[in-house]
Amino acid sequence: MEQKQKNNELLWPAWQAMFGYEEMYMQALAWLNECDEVLLVSHMHPDGDAASATTSMSWILDQLEIPHTAINIDPLPKKFQKQYNFSNVLQASITAAPLEKFKYVIFVDCADRERTGDLTAWIDDNANILNVDHHATNKKFGTVNVVDPIAASATEVIFGLFCYLELSLEQEFAYSIYTGMLTDTEGFRYSNTTPRVLRTAATCLETGIPGHVIAEESLGQTTKAHVELLKRALQRLQFSDDGRIAFVSVTVQDMDETNGTFADLEGIVNIPRNAEDVEVGVLFKEMKAGTVKVSLRSGDSMNVSDIAGLFGGGGHKKAAGCTVNGSIEDAINIIIPEITKVLTKVPVNGG
Ligand code: 5GP
Ligand code: MN
């Protein structure tokens, strides 16, 4: 970690000139100047960006000497264990609640407050909230909202904050920033891969972090449970009558039999989505009897966050999610007609 790069004079003006977010970051700085003990949280079932946003924000707080506790309702996936402060991130379900609730809370990668799961034992009702996110559907629930919907990942927003704060770039911070951008763009492939993403990624690589190792760890390697769950999901693969929607499902029994975790489901929804002529891929995941989590993926033809929004969920145009009550079959009967309704208005092949 010796390599340091005095980058801020070069980076911040470029960032600011492109998007004019100075006011937003100025408010974040004022919030950081005022806070004391901070609770740092991200969304349940943390993915690469949630984990990386947590560890990179923790790095910034340490640079600013702001005492903080990072927590998630679920464990961060082990494949991100090399990240800064990874082992200090608490898991709420196995940690005793604090005597005093936190009055300053930073949310990263959360479109709404409910995304963290129930942390009421940790967060004061009148807490001062800094909301750092990149979802277009963000509810702006913070006292200060640093929300940049152009950013591909929450870590890209955190990199903007880092530039504004004029900190010096170090490998351990670059490692997390790069991982969040890599995973939320699915390997720099999605349409959120802007020139700014690649410039920021290049800046991270200049610190000497191994991009290919990060790619292999975070996107390449998979678990045995993942492959087993994929097998079961594909056994239930169905196409809509017009072939424009493909969907799979995973039951509680599948999860039990494979010893699978939520993280083991990552990527499964892309397989039906990528089939020829398919415009929307869906994964129905039974969380418990009567509750189904729905993951939606689309190409250019429609905005799936509109569908998720109908059921209290959200996300991005091409990747969104929600939870519905009922069996998997009920969920299929609710969700698929809503997608069909939209697709019938769109010419085949995106138009
Ligand atoms: P996934 O399908 O991988 O769980 O989520 C895809 C995208 O949708 C992510 O950006 C995720 O944050 C968002 N998302 C998934 N489920 C929900 C939900 O219940 N509410 C909201 N607001 N966003 C969700
Ligand atoms: Mn994200």
Image (cartoon, grey):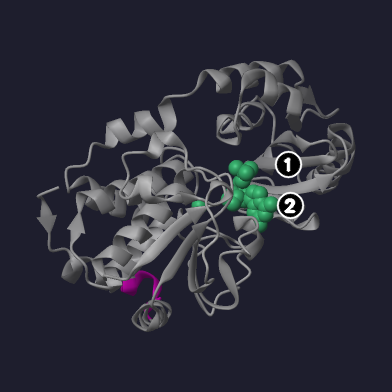
Residue 128: image x %, image y %?
Answer: 52, 79
Q: Quadrant of residue 38?
A: bottom left
Measured as percent of width and height from the top left, residue 207 is found at 17, 48
Q: Amino acid at mark 2?
A: Ala
The segment highlighted magenta reads 16-22
Q: Which residue is painted at 42% across and 24% down in the image?
A: 221
Name the residue type under label 1. Val
For image coordinates 88% across by 41% down, the residue present is 326
Would you say the beta carbon of the disc 1 residue lies within 8 angstroms of ligand 1? yes
Lateral position of residue 240 relative to residue 52, left or right: right
Q: Is residue 133 left or right of residue 217?
A: right
Question: Which residue is denoted by mark 1 in the rendering?
Answer: 294
In the drawing, does residue 283 fall left or right of residue 329? Answer: left
Residue 288 vs residue 310, the one in the foreground? 288
According to the picture, the residue beneath numbered tag 2 turns out to be 308
Q: Residues within 10 Å of mark 2 (few under 14, many from 20)?
A: many
Horizontal side of 96 relative to 22 (left or right) equals: right
Tell me: is circle 2 under 8 Å from ligand 1: yes
Which label belongs to residue 118? none
Residue 231 sits above or below residue 333 on the image: above
